[in-house]
Image: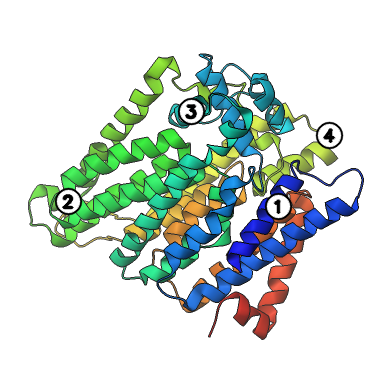
């Protein structure tokens, strides 16, 4: 059923190349939309029914992904932007100064709001995109289809890392794979939508796994360095990758305090925590800076010409407020971008600090280094930090939730919480499809009301949450 649903989503993708409702309703368009609805429903139902089929996760991912390899970018047009940016860099130009719309045929396929903007991704992502365009000999179709190669690598890394994180947290690894990697949200957005979030999340999870392995083998300092290097790589794919550094430091520090001797490096004190932070941050910054320095690209993604996520409607509360003020209050967008970005930054930092206070290692105050203090839970801390970044960010797209989902699936949860998350995944997948046609102002209320209705109907809730 999931394979058939995937095939139908490919048919829908080729039949609906542009987002939004068509100007004229034709029978062929209705048939294409129906193909998408039926295909998405089939994948959701197949996913829910596969919950109890232990040991078939790899088969599920492969069977559902193979048809998507022949699809255009699904549920988003970001794949065309990747190809356009890669084309600009492959032609020897700077994607941080040349607008995406200037990339010939590929530039015309970029979503309208972004055609006049420059790249927003770090250089590592741009070099990967340029490599794919070069391999495709700049052929427009093959250039965009090859953007699935890094997406497939990201999905493979996630498939490898999630079970190991789950076992570290004493969680059922098969269940974690089912929830985080084998779900329609991840498969459709990472492989179907070819978003670089997949590769970024995969590399970030690898950083955590490598750190855990080295730390448990008694090589915590090496874990900090290796983890930091990989975090730097994740950050060059997409900026949120640097958040994995929080988990790297917390994992090493907590393990050192719990299993180390009474020497200074293992004590639960602020100086030890700060030194460990520096030990991970230095290699991370070195890798990030080294890749950014190639051909002088640097921090061009901070240019004022880069596309600002606040400028378009998304599921972010802050972006929604900005668009409301822009439409009803008549406030110019350029006057709101700065304040909205600042508010987002303040709220995000405050939420991350709260997460550290709730789940992070907090040494005892004063000079009593022999006190126990609070060690917290590193993986819960990592999950909380990512969720804080997503919720309070200036932009929120459904695929931004994949990293948070991977972390949440890897920690101990109550049955009720797992049910809420499972139903949430279904809701987000439906939301992603609906937003291809309509604005979040229409889709969000519909999905939220639908979620609440399903939750109040026992049989419907039991089916959606895959309850026995």
Q: Position of residue 444 (x, y in %)?
A: 73, 57
Mark carried by residue 422: none
| Colouring chosen for the image of the structure | rainbow
Mark carried by residue 11: 1
Local crowd size for mark 3, using a 10 Å CA cut-off: few (<14), some (14–19), many (≥20): few
Q: Which image quarter: residue 216?
A: bottom left
Instruction: Between residue 394 and residue 424, name the one nearer to us.
Output: 424
Cα distance between the residues tagged 3 and 1: 26 Å
* Apparent side of residue 363 relative to residue 173 in the rendered image (left or right): left
Q: Earlier in the sequence, mark 3 or mark 2?
A: 3
Instruction: Between residue 410 and residue 389, name the one nearer to us.
Output: 410
Q: Earlier in the sequence, mark 3 or mark 1?
A: 1
Cα distance between the residues tagged 3 and 2: 59 Å
Q: Earlier in the sequence, mark 4 or mark 2?
A: 4
Label 4: state its secondary structure.
loop
Label 3: state its secondary structure.
helix
Q: Which residue is mark 4?
A: 330
Q: Position of residue 5 (x, y in %)?
A: 64, 62
Q: Position of residue 142 (x, y in %)?
A: 58, 33
Q: Are marks 3 and 4 in contact (CB under 8 Å)?
A: no
Q: Earlier in the sequence, mark 2 or mark 1?
A: 1
Cα distance between the residues tagged 2 and 1: 66 Å
Q: Earlier in the sequence, mark 4 or mark 1?
A: 1
**Callout in the foreground (4, 1):** 1
Mark carried by residue 367: 2
Cα distance between the residues tagged 4 and 2: 56 Å
Q: Which residue is mark 3?
A: 135
Q: Residue at x 74, y 42 (%)?
A: 17
């Amino acid at each position: 059923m999931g394979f058939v649903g995937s095939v139908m989503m490919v048919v829908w993708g080729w039949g609906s190349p542009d987002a939004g409702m068509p100007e004229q309703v034709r029978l062929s368009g209705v048939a294409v939309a129906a193909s998408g609805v039926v295909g998405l429903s089939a994948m959701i139902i197949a996913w829910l029914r596969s919950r109890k089929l232990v040991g078939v996760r790899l088969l599920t991912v492969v069977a559902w992904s193979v048809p998507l390899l022949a699809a255009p970018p699904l549920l988003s047009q970001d794949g065309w932007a990747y190809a356009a940016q890669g084309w600009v860099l492959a032609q020897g130009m700077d994607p941080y100064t040349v607008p995406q719309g200037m990339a010939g045929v590929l530039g015309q396929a970029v979503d309208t709001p972004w055609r006049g903007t420059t790249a927003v991704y770090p250089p590592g992502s741009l070099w990967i995109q340029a490599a794919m365009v070069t391999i495709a000999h700049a052929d427009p179709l093959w250039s965009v289809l090859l953007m699935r190669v890094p997406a497939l690598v990201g999905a493979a890394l996630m498939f490898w890392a999630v079970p190991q994180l789950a076992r570290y947290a004493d969680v059922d690894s098969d269940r974690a794979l089912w929830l985080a990697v084998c779900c329609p949200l991840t498969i459709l957005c990472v492989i179907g939508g070819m978003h670089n979030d997949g590769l970024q999340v995969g590399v970030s999870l690898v950083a955590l796994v490598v750190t855990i392995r080295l730390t448990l083998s008694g090589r915590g300092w090496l874990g900090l360095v290796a983890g930091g290097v990989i975090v730097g790589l994740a950050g060059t794919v997409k900026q949120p990758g640097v958040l994995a550094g929080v988990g790297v430091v917390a994992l090493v520090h907590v393990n050192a305090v719990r299993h180390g001797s009474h020497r200074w490096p293992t004590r639960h004190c602020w100086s030890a925590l700060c030194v460990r932070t520096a030990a991970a941050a230095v290699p991370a910054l070195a890798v990030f800076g080294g890749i950014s320095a190639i051909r002088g690209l640097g921090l061009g993604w901070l240019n004022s010409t880069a596309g600002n996520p606040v400028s378009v409607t998304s599921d972010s509360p802050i972006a929604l407020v900005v668009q409301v003020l822009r439409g009803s209050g008549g406030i110019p967008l350029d006057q709101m971008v700065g304040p909205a970005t600042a508010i987002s930054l303040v709220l995000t930092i405050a939420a991350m600090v709260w997460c550290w206070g709730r789940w992070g290692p907090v040494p005892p105050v004063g000079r009593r280094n022999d006190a126990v203090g609070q060690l917290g839970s590193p993986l819960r801390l990592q999950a909380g930090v990512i969720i804080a970044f997503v919720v309070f960010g200036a932009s929120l797209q459904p695929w931004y939730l994949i990293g948070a989902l991977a972390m949440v699936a890897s920690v101990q949860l109550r049955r009720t919480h797992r049910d809420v998350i499972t139903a949430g995944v279904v809701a987000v997948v439906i939301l992603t499809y609906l937003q291809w046609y309509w604005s979040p102002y229409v889709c969000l209320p519909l999905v939220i009301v639908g979620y609440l209705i399903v939750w109040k109907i026992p049989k419907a809730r039991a089916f959606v949450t895959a309850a026995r």
